[in-house]
Structures are given as structure tokens and as C-alpha cells.
């Protein structure tokens, strides 16, 4: 009979092999899903994973989707290393988009070079302010950050909707819920001419590297790591816990806010309700998949960006729902966590099958009690 | 004379990854016998007991219960046979009542009538002189009372073999005496008792026979009423390990640290509040604080480390008020602390020794403008490892991978190397092998002789009497007077541990005298 | 304010509070065993989707409910596999379940958007529903509202009086001690997680078969998360879950009430109310950590594997 046994030493191989294994399992499951839907699985997988990046334009689109994912993921990495379960990147992102839009719409007539930095700053500040609410609730009111950040996400979404239906609505927009187009001076320069890829990707790569440096070289990175591993030891060592929490949330909020700002000043050029297809949530998967390491989250964000492109391709080429993206992302995270168990445990085959039988009486009462 | 033994173990083997906890253990326990199972920490005693109680399964070997071969299906099965166990870290549920805790261990049918159960609990506990109120919540009970709940829980099921794991380590001397008389009464009624301990004097007082384990193997069996403690100790630790350290008399200097009526209200419903603690530590002395776990030791340690802050003037160190300073600021002034929890507080389990060096030694020039110089950290870690003979696979080994003794040497070494003027250590040798314990004691004495003040908080009275030149006890968040060790009897200390002393605020007079 | 309006509001409160009550009762049991399942939102969506498709394809609401419950249980067992058997981080596993459930329900349900079923209708209980004021509020509701009240009683009695409830609390307080006492910790946790899944699946089916008898992507709109906050708010006690569910129920129909009064507030701003109320309640409650701590299942969120 199979049993799980704790390893003496954690497996390094599994730590880095687990994301690969999870991807393989996801692809295998995808294969089965296509079979189940009575479609050609090879063709389906090709459309999902390969066709989107089969030309220069495709790679540019990949980079375009990567940028917001990686920015959000870099910020979340700082939080998650400290085991601060901030799932509010989506909200920070949306507020960043709103903040940048407010600034951009103030300067719709200006052509100065300073407009764009100001607009981006608007996004960063707005995202950071939004994350500060959760930080404040955590440090001063002991509120669970998971619940507060998710609530703040819903509130941010409604604020965005309010903005595009009300104060920021384009007066000449035929009552569409969206803002006016921004001036050219508020738009991000392109990275590759002829594509939509803008310099937001550079911000993202820079952020990922910076996060890597924080955790490998700086004392605050070390303190965050200890806080995450062992809050008691952090208290014993005398690390400033509240300040660390604020730092992590501010970085996460600022970077996600920048992502939101880059999205409205990049490919979209105005504020629209669907500014995010769930980047903030997908970034969570990126962080776990990327092992909370700079290189890891860069690769992870590329893979998850591909799932967005793949979902769109499914719709166009195979007439399957775009929601395939969410399905693949969910499967990926699910398999990843399953595989991660084998970092600490290994499967062992016990020939004796000596597993003790649970006292039957106890089990029965539990059931009976619930059904009574 | 040919009566069948109650319990016989033959060639029990239990293998864990990287450690053979039991390596062919044989053991025979007769009816009505109080049998000691002796051994150092890590010798395999706990594993063996869990096997007898069915919590874990042996890889090899045979168990005979009253002559019949047996495969235990689990603790419920063991209890049904008449095997009861009292765990060292009690297996009680604090948020449930005494009766509910006992009901959970009984078969469902027997536990249904709660009123009858209450009656039985009262009867059994009264019969053995251990009064218990079935309706009380366990978290409101003292440690000694909790142990009674565990024992009554076994007796109510008519146990014919009672296993006790280090039962005396959590009791005051008076409570130990009460426990022993209960155990003797039980044995005279025919119940067998397996008594796990490393306290040799107690074993000699109580037990009929003794089996000694070392590194998972039986190294000897003896009659503890005849053998000397030194001879038994040799069986436990083997040749070549010093059994204790020599402690030359202390030569105290000027006063270093004063607590002025320090109070602290615990916000934790399961915590203890500190009540007007007064304490005076001098350079070059080791002061001991005895007490049963959970009487405010942890809060006292936190108040000294800076994890709990108080009004500045309630704590002065070298003449400066420090009560309002955090741990980092206090450490910079030369106050070092070694907490009770090695893994999880003194060291981060999954970080390397290098990272764990940085944890509290960062002020030793390892951090400049927020940047860490890992070369310096590594050098420092290497110095700790060499100077204090920490056995580890390397500096990148995780704290978790070290044995208790080696990790404790590392933590004490990390603090000692920073040349503190005050070291507070809580249970420094708890769960540590004898060799490491001796080494740790030496470090404390060395620090003392270099002019530091050492405060030793411990449950181990032998350790306290051996090292300290002044001693007192903490109970319910109040501190007893402190007396010079030679003039303090164990009976007096036992009374203090039970809370029988004048208010510590009044005790300040005694400090002045002492 | 007219009496009729008050009755209507209270009756709607009961309806709006029912999915929250169901989820929170299930999660209460789950958390009492020491397992925190953050996947409620995902399980609820899958339950709603499965319930709707089940009812639509079989033509029977009851089969729809069965499908919803079964889907909830299946999802929760996936979670238990990760969080209980494989001892994964419960936070991460719960998030994974929500992300997976959101994706799965959107994918499978995409063909069913725009369809409708004839949902559960109100059943007036003879005699009782004629009681003035209380009658129309309490005794003129649909079947699942009644079911939720029955489940409340079941959970209450189970926790308070049964041996199973005692076992559950014991495991939730200290799995180590429970294991040392020979209790089947993993089995009890599986049952608790599964029960939570069933209740959340039922809540999902309630959304798509009674509350708004249709399926739309993300239709639970954060109710799973609000229910999680509700359990914290209730400090793990069923009586307070009942009270809290209807309190949150009021919050979620507050925009309708305010609009009914003719207040001219942007609907987007009003839609924030339930989330805002949740945060405010969390703040009021959590600022006293001592009281919360006393009731928190002590082992919550910590993975446990017995060593053998």
C-alpha cells in the first residue's frame, strides 16, 4: 500500500522540477479535455500553446501580456516571501489604471515630456494608496489580509465602473462606459515598432530583477524572509514587523499600480471597464510557479501570458470558449501544489500494508451526527 | 514465580529517515512492577513507548501482551487491552472540559451517560487521592492537575499497564511526592508501571527494575535500588562523556540589571500576566529561576528580551532605563537572550546556519546601509561552529537538520560570541544530550567568570542547584524572594514553586539583604 | 415606512442571507476541524454551474440540487487531497481551488449562458404563514431557505451535543493530541471538508436555481469570500453565523432598499456596500484579538500529517 513519508531533507530537484511537472500534467489534462470535447487534441494543444507565438507579432503580444503579469507578480513575491497573503493585486492594478487615467485626462491637451512620467506616477501612487488600506487594516486592526484585499478588489472594480460611467466618462463617447482617448504625450513609447509591445515590459523585467536583489543582498529582504518563515523568530530578533508589512504592501501596490497605468497608457490608450482580464489573480499563479525567484517569475509570467493568448486563439480558431484560459490556469496551480508536496514527502510502497484501521465507531458518529 | 509477564517486547526496530530510533530492543515488564526506562534525550525512549501504545508501528519485532502475541491497531486498541499512557506533553484538549477529555478516550457506549461518567471520575480520582472536578475546562487547570486528568483517564479504563513519559519534569517536588504515592498504591494493586525518566534519583526512589537505552539499543538492565546514580548514568551516556561540569564559586560584582516592580498584562487568554516583579542581577553571578512551565517564565523572558516593552524605568540595565527598548536596541547594549524554543524562535528551522547567524548577530558589522555582507556572516557562523563544536553537515545546513544539542550550542554560541554583559537563558539544556548540556553549562560559567550576569530560567532543579549562586521561583506571574543557593532547601524551593511566598514587591527587602 | 415594505425587506433579507448561511455553516464545520478552505468562491461557482446544468438537462430542480451538492463535494475532495493528504499550504490550496473553480465553471457553463429554468418557488406553510408579520417573512419562502434553517439546527446540535462534534473540536484544537489518542485525524478532516463542500455546492445551486434562476459567469460575486468573513465574524459559533448571515444579507440588498426609498446614488457605488460592510465588520471584530483568539480553532491553517 502506498504511503507518504517525510523526507529527511527537502528535495531540491522537486523544488525546481515541480513547475515543469505541473506544466506537463496540465498539458496531458488539456489533451484529455480536447478528447472529451471530441476535438483533435494535437491540433487543440498546438493552437493553444504554439500558434500564438509562431511569428514576431505573436511574441510581441506575449511580451505585452507579460508586462502587467510580471509587474504584479514581482510585487506579490515581496508579500508572499513574508507570507503576507495579499491577493489584492487585481485591485491595486485597477486603482492604478484609474489613477493614471485621472492624471492623463487632466493633461489631454499637453504635449510635454513630463506628462507620461506624471501619469505613471499617478498609477503607482494610486495603487500604493489602495494597498495601504489593507496594510493599515492588518497592522492596526489585525484584519486578515486575504479577506480585506479580496473585498478591496471588488470595491476597486466598482470604483472603476463608477469612474467610467460617471466622472471619467467620455462626454462624446456615445454613452459607452469609457473615458476619452489619452493624448499622445501620455502614451508609452513602443519597444518594437509596428507592434503593440511598449516599454512596460522593461519596467517589469527591472522590477523582477530588483526583487531578486532585495532578497539576495539586502537586510530588509532577509527580514521579510524571516518574517515569512517564522514570525516568532522575527519578533525575537526584533525586526520591525509593522514596517515590514507596510513595505511589502507598498511595493506590491506600487508595482501593480504601475502595471495598471501601463495598461491604460499602452495598448488601450483610454480607461475601459475591461482593463484587466484578471492579471492580478493570474499573477498569484506566476509567483507560485516562479518559486518566488526573479528568473522563475519571468518565465512564469511568459507561460501565463501564453495562456491568455491561447484562450483567445481557442475562440478564434476552434470556436471554444475563451474561459479555457481560466481552466488551464487553475489546473496549472492545482497540479503545482500537488507536485510541491513531493518536495517534502516521498511516496513509499509498504508491502506489509500495516496501516492501522481507524476506530470505526468514531467515524460513524461523525457521519451520523451530521445527518441527524 | 513462573507467572506470565504482562508485557514482553522482542527485537523492536523502528527506522526513520536518517535515524534508527529503536534498534532491536527487548523489554519485559511484570505484573505489579514499577519499571524504569532510562536513557538520554534521543535514546529512543519516546519511540518505544509510542510503539507500546500503538501510536506508531514498529518495522520489526514482536509484542506479547500477557503472553499472547499482539499487533496493535492503534491507541484505541491499546486502551481496550488495558494499556494507558500519560504523555510528557499532555495529549489533552484545552478548550474541552475534564469530562469531555475523558469521554473522548472511552468507547462511545461508555461515554454516553455524562452524569454517570462524572460520578466515576470523582470516584476514581478520590480513591487515588487526586481530586478532580469533571466540569472544569482543562485550560483553567494547573500543570499538576492536568497530569491527574491524564492519569485518571487511564485508570478509569482499568489500565493494567500505565506508561508515564517524564511525568515529574512538570511537577513541584511536593507534587512529585504525591504522584509517587499514587503510583505505589497502583502497583500494590497489581498495575504495572513503565516509568520513563532521566532523573536517576527519582528512579532509585520509586522503581523496582530499570532498563537503560542508548542510541536505540538496550545497554543494560539493573536494580536501581542497589546501583549508584553514577553507575546508572554511565550506562546511559557511555564512556568518555563527562557527566557534569565543575562550577567554581562565583564572585559577584556591581549590580547590572534591575527590575523595578515590573508588571505586564497578558493579552493572550492562555498566557500569564506578570505581577510586580523585582529582580536585581549583579555582574559575575548566575541567578536561577525555578518554576513549573507556564507560570510566567515565557513572559519574563520576553520582558527581558524586549519582545514585551514596559515603561522605561521599570527595567534598568547598567544604570540606563531600557524598559521601552525593543530587542534590537537592547542587544546593542549587551543584553542577550536564549529563548526556550530553539526551533521557531531562537532559530528559523528552514534557514541555513549562515542566515540564522544574521538573525541576531547583524550588529556585528554584517550589514552596511541595508546591504548584507554575506562573507562576514559566513565567517562569523564558521567561528561559532568551530569555537562551540557545533556538529553540522556545513554552514548551509538548515537549523532543522541539527540535533537539539548542536543547535542549542549554536544558538548559545551565537549570543556568547557577541560578548554580552547579560545573558538570559531559558531551559538551555532541555531535550539536549548530556555532552552538549555539559558544554552549554561551561559556556554559561565562562560568561559569568568574564563578568557577565547570567539569568537561568529552568525547570531542571538539579541544573539550577549546580550552577546558580542565588535562586528563586516563579509562580502565577509572581517572583519569590531570591536566596543564596547554599541556604536554600529543596523543600523551601518547592513551596515557592507552588506559589507559597510573600508578595515579590515585599521581597525587594530580601534582595537588599542578599 | 409601511409595514409591507418592512416585511418585504425582511423577507428578501432571508433570501439574500441563505447562500451565505449555507456556505458559512459548512465552512464552520470545516474550520472547526482545523482546515481553512479559502476555495469557497470557486466551489460555489462550480456548484451553481453544475446545479443549473443538472436542472436544465434533467428538467428536475431536485436533480439540479443533487448535481450542485455533488459538484461541491467533488471540489472539496480535490482540496482535501491537497490540504489534508498532501499537507499543502491551506491558503495556497484554497486559492488554487477558487481559481480552478472559477475557470472550470466558466468553461463548462459557457454554453448555458442565457438559458433559464423555472426556479424554486415560495411555499407558504399552511397556518404558520398566516401569522401576522412573522408568517410572510419566515413561512413563505422557497424550499432551500427552509433547508438552510434545518441545516442550522443540525449543525448546532451536532457541535453542541454529539460525540462527533466533540471529536471534531478535539481534532481542530490539537491534531497531535488527537492522533496520540487514536482518533482518525485525517478521516475526520476529510469528512469536515466534504461537508463544507456539500453545503457550498448547495449554496451554489441555490444561487442558480432559486435566487436568480440562470447561470452567468462569476455569478457568486464574492459571496464565498463574504461567507468566510462571516465565519470569523461569528467566532466559529453557529448562532452568530445565523445572525451574521442575515446581517450580511441586509447589506447585500441595501442598494435595493435605498433605491426603493428613491435615493439617487450611482448603482456602482451602491454595489460596493456588501464588501464595504464586510471590511467594517472585520475591523470592528478583529480589533479585539483576545476574544477572537479564545474561540479560534487552535490548529487552524496548519497542515498536519501523523508520523507512523
Image (spheres, helix red, strand yellow):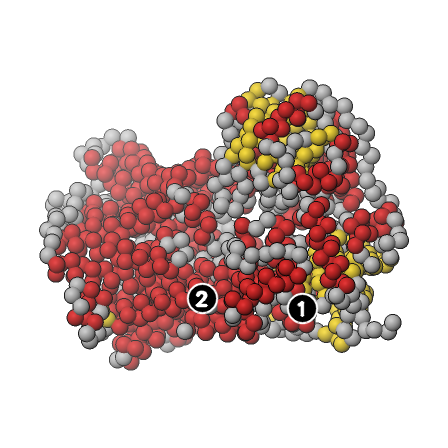
Using the image, name the chain to which the residue with label 1 belongs: B
Q: In the structure shown, which secondary structural element does the residue marked by tag 1 occupy?
A: loop
The residue shown at (30%, 75%) is: C64
> Given contact means CB atoms under 8 Å apart, are the residues at marks 2 and 1 in contact?
no
Residue assigned mark 1: B158
Residue located 16% across and 70% down the image: C130
Q: Is B415 situated above or below C114?
A: above
Q: Residues within 10 Å of mark 1 (few under 14, many from 20)?
A: some
Q: Which chain does tag 2 point to?
A: C
Residue A105, given in percent of the width and then of the height, sits at: 20, 38
The residue positioned 35% from the left and 56% from the top of the image is: C240
Nearer to the camera, A192 or B394:
B394
Where does residue B159 sit, x and y in percent of width and height? 68, 67
Mark linked to residue C161: 2
Coordinates of residue A16 in the picture (x, y in percent)? 55, 54
Quadrant where the C terminus of chain B is found in the figure: top right
For the residues beneath circles 2 and 1, the answer to whether they share a chain is: no
Q: Residues within 10 Å of mark 2 (few under 14, many from 20)?
A: few
Select label 2 or label 1 by which is in front.
Answer: 1
Cα–Cα gap, marks 2 and 1? 27 Å
- Where does the N terminus of chain B fall, quadrant-wise? bottom right
B60 or A20, which is in the foreground? B60
- Whether residue C121 is visible here, answered yes or no, is no
SS category of the residue bearing label 2: helix
Q: Based on the displayed image, in which of its 4 quarters is residue B353 positioned?
A: top right
* Coordinates of residue B500 in the picture (x, y in percent): 64, 39
Q: Can the viewer see residue C207?
A: yes
Amino acid at each position: 500500500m502506498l504511503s507518504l513519508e517525510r523526507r529527511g531533507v527537502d528535495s531540491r530537484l522537486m523544488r525546481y522540477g515541480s513547475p515543469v511537472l505541473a506544466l506537463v500534467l496540465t498539458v496531458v489534462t488539456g489533451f484529455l479535455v480536447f478528447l472529451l470535447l471530441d476535438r483533435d487534441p494535437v491540433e487543440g494543444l498546438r493552437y493553444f500553446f504554439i500558434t500564438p507565438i509562431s511569428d514576431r507579432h505573436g511574441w510581441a503580444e506575449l511580451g505585452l501580456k507579460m508586462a502587467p503579469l510580471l509587474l504584479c507578480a514581482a510585487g506579490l513575491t515581496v508579500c508572499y516571501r513574508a507570507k503576507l497573503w495579499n491577493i489584492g493585486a487585481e485591485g491595486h492594478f485597477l486603482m492604478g489604471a484609474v489613477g493614471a487615467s485621472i492624471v492623463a485626462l487632466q493633461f489631454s491637451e499637453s504635449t510635454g515630456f513630463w506628462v507620461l512620467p506624471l501619469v505613471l506616477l499617478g498609477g503607482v501612487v494610486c495603487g500604493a494608496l489602495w494597498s495601504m488600506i489593507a496594510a493599515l487594516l492588518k497592522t492596526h486592526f489585525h484584519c486578515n489580509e486575504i479577506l480585506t484585499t479580496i473585498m478591496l478588489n471588488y470595491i476597486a472594480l466598482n470604483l472603476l465602473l463608477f469612474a467610467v460611467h460617471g466622472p471619467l466618462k467620455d462626454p462624446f463617447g456615445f454613452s459607452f462606459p469609457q473615458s476619452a482617448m489619452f493624448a499622445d504625450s501620455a502614451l508609452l513609447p513602443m519597444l518594437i515598432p509596428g507592434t503593440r509591445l511598449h516599454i512596460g515590459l522593461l519596467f517589469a523585467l527591472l522590477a523582477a530583477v530588483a526583487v531578486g536583489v532585495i532578497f539576495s543582498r539586502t537586510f530588509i529582504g532577509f527580514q521579510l524572509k524571516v518574517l515569512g518563515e517564522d514570525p516568532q523568530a522575527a519578533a525575537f530578533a526584533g525586526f520591525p514587523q509593522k514596517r515590514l508589512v507596510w513595505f511589502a504592501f507598498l511595493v506590491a501596490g506600487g508595482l501593480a499600480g504601475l502595471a495598471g497605468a501601463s495598461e491604460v497608457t499602452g495598448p488601450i490608450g483610454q480607461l475601459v471597464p475591461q482593463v484587466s482580464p484578471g492579471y492580478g489573480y493570474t499573477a498569484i499563479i506566476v509567483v507560485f510557479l516562479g518559486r518566488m525567484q526573479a528568473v522563475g517569475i519571468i518565465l512564469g509570467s511568459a507561460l501565463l501570458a501564453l495562456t491568455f493568448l491561447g484562450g483567445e486563439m481557442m475562440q478564434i480558431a476552434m470556436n471554444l470558449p475563451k474561459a479555457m484560459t481560466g481552466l488551464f490556469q487553475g489546473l496549472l496551480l492545482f497540479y503545482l501544489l500537488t507536485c510541491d508536496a513531493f518536495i517534502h514527502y516521498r511516496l513509499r510502497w509498504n508491502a506489509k500494508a500495516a496501516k492501522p484501521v481507524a476506530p470505526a465507531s468514531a467515524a460513524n458518529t461523525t457521519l451520523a451526527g451530521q445527518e441527524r | 514465580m513462573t507467572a506470565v509477564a504482562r508485557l514482553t517486547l522482542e527485537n523492536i526496530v523502528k527506522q526513520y529517515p536518517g535515524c534508527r530510533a529503536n534498534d532491536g530492543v527487548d523489554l519485559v515488564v511484570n505484573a505489579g512492577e514499577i519499571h524504569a526506562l532510562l536513557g538520554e534525550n534521543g535514546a529512543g525512549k519516546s519511540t518505544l513507548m509510542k510503539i507500546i501504545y500503538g501510536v506508531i508501528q514498529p518495522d520489526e519485532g514482536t509484542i506479547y501482551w500477557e503472553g499472547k502475541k499482539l499487533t496493535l491497531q492503534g491507541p484505541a486498541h491499546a486502551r481496550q487491552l488495558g494499556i494507558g499512557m500519560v504523555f510528557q506533553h499532555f495529549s489533552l484538549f484545552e478548550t474541552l472540559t475534564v469530562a469531555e477529555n475523558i469521554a473522548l478516550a472511552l468507547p462511545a457506549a461508555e461515554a454516553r451517560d455524562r452524569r454517570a461518567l462524572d460520578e466515576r471520575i470523582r470516584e476514581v480520582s478520590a480513591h487515588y487521592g487526586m481530586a478532580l472536578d469533571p466540569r472544569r475546562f482543562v485550560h483553567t487547570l494547573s500543570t499538576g492537575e492536568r497530569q491527574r486528568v491524564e492519569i485518571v483517564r487511564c485508570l478509569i479504563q482499568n489500565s493494567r499497564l500505565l506508561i508515564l513519559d517524564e511525568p515529574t519534569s512538570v511537577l513541584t517536588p511536593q507534587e512529585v511526592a504525591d504522584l509517587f504515592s499514587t503510583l505505589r498504591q497502583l502497583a500494590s494493586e497489581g498495575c504495572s508501571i513503565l516509568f520513563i525518566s532521566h532523573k536517576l534519583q527519582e528512579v532509585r526512589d520509586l522503581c523496582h527494575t530499570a532498563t537503560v537505552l542508548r542510541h536505540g539499543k538496550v545497554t543494560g538492565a539493573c536494580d536501581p535500588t542497589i546501583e549508584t546514580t553514577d553507575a546508572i548514568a554511565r550506562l546511559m551516556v557511555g564512556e568518555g562523556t563527562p557527566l557534569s561540569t565543575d562550577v567554581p564559586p562565583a564572585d559577584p560584582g556591581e549590580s547590572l540589571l534591575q527590575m523595578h516592580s515590573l508588571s505586564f498584562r497578558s493579552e493572550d487568554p492562555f498566557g500569564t500576566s506578570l505581577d510586580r516583579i523585582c529582580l536585581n542581577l549583579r555582574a559575575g553571578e548566575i541567578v536561577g529561576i525555578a518554576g513549573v512551565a507556564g507560570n510566567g517564565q515565557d513572559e519574563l523572558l520576553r520582558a527581558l528580551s524586549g519582545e514585551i516593552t514596559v515603561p522605561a524605568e521599570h527595567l534598568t540595565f547598567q544604570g540606563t532605563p531600557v524598559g521601552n527598548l525593543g530587542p534590537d536596541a537592547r542587544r546593542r547594549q549587551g543584553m542577550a537572550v536564549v529563548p526556550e524554543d530553539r526551533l521557531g524562535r531562537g532559530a528559523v528551522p528552514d534557514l541555513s546556519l549562515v542566515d540564522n547567524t544574521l538573525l541576531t548577530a547583524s550588529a556585528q558589522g554584517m550589514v552596511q546601509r541595508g546591504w548584507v555582507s554575506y562573507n562576514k556572516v559566513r565567517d562569523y557562523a564558521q567561528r561559532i561552529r568551530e569555537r562551540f563544536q557545533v556538529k553540522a553537515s556545513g554552514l548551509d545546513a538548515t537549523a532543522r537538520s541539527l540535533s537539539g544539542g548542536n543547535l542549542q550550542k549554536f544558538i548559545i554560541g551565537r549570543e556568547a560570541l557577541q560578548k554580552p554583559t547579560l545573558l538570559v537563558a531559558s531551559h538551555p539544556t532541555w531535550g539536549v544530550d548530556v555532552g552538549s548540556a555539559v558544554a552549554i553549562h561551561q559556556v554559561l560559567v565562562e560568561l559569568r567568570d568574564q563578568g557577565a550576569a547570567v539569568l537561568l530560567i529552568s525547570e531542571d532543579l538539579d541544573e539550577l542547584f549546580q550552577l546558580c549562586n542565588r535562586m528563586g521561583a516563579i509562580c502565577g506571574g509572581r517572583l519569590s524572594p531570591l536566596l543564596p543557593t547554599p541556604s536554600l532547601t529543596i523543600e523551601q524551593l518547592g513551596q515557592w514553586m507552588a506559589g507559597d511566598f510573600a508578595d515579590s514587591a515585599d521581597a525587594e527587602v530580601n534582595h537588599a539583604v542578599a | 415606512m409601511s409595514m409591507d415594505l418592512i416585511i418585504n425587506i425582511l423577507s428578501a433579507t432571508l433570501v439574500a442571507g441563505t447562500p451565505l448561511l449555507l456556505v458559512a455553516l459548512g465552512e464552520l464545520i470545516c474550520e472547526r476541524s482545523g482546515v481553512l478552505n479559502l476555495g469557497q468562491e470557486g466551489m460555489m461557482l462550480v456548484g451553481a454551474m453544475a446545479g443549473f446544468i443538472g436542472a436544465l438537462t434533467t428538467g428536475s430542480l431536485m436533480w439540479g440540487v443533487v448535481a450542485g451538492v455533488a459538484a461541491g463535494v467533488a471540489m472539496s475532495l480535490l482540496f482535501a487531497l491537497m490540504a489534508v493528504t498532501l499537507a499543502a499550504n491551506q491558503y495556497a490550496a484554497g486559492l488554487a481551488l477558487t481559481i480552478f473553480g472559477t475557470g472550470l465553471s466558466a468553461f463548462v457553463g459557457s454554453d448555458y449562458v442565457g438559458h433559464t429554468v423555472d426556479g424554486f418557488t415560495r411555499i407558504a406553510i399552511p397556518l404558520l404563514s398566516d401569522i401576522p408579520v412573522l408568517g410572510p417573512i419566515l413561512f413563505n419562502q422557497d424550499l432551500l431557505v427552509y433547508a438552510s434553517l434545518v441545516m442550522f439546527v443540525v449543525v448546532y446540535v451536532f457541535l453542541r451535543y454529539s460525540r462527533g462534534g466533540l471529536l471534531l473540536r478535539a481534532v481542530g484544537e490539537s491534531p497531535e493530541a488527537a492522533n496520540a489518542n487514536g482518533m482518525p485525524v485525517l478521516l475526520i478532516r476529510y469528512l469536515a471538508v466534504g461537508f463544507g463542500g456539500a453545503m457550498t455546492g448547495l449554496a451554489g445551486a441555490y444561487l442558480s436555481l432559486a435566487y436568480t434562476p440562470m447561470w452567468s459567469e462569476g455569478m457568486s460575486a464574492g459571496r464565498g469570500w463574504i461567507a468566510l468573513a462571516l465565519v470569523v465574524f461569528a467566532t466559529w459559533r453557529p448562532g452568530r453565523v445565523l445572525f451574521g448571515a442575515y446581517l450580511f444579507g441586509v447589506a447585500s440588498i441595501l442598494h435595493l432598499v435605498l433605491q426603493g426609498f428613491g435615493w439617487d446614488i450611482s448603482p456602482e457605488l451602491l454595489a460596493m456596500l456588501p464588501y464595504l460592510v464586510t471590511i467594517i465588520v472585520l475591523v470592528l471584530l478583529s480589533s479585539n484579538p483576545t476574544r477572537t483568539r479564545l474561540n479560534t480553532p487552535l490548529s487552524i491553517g496548519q497542515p498536519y500529517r501523523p508520523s507512523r
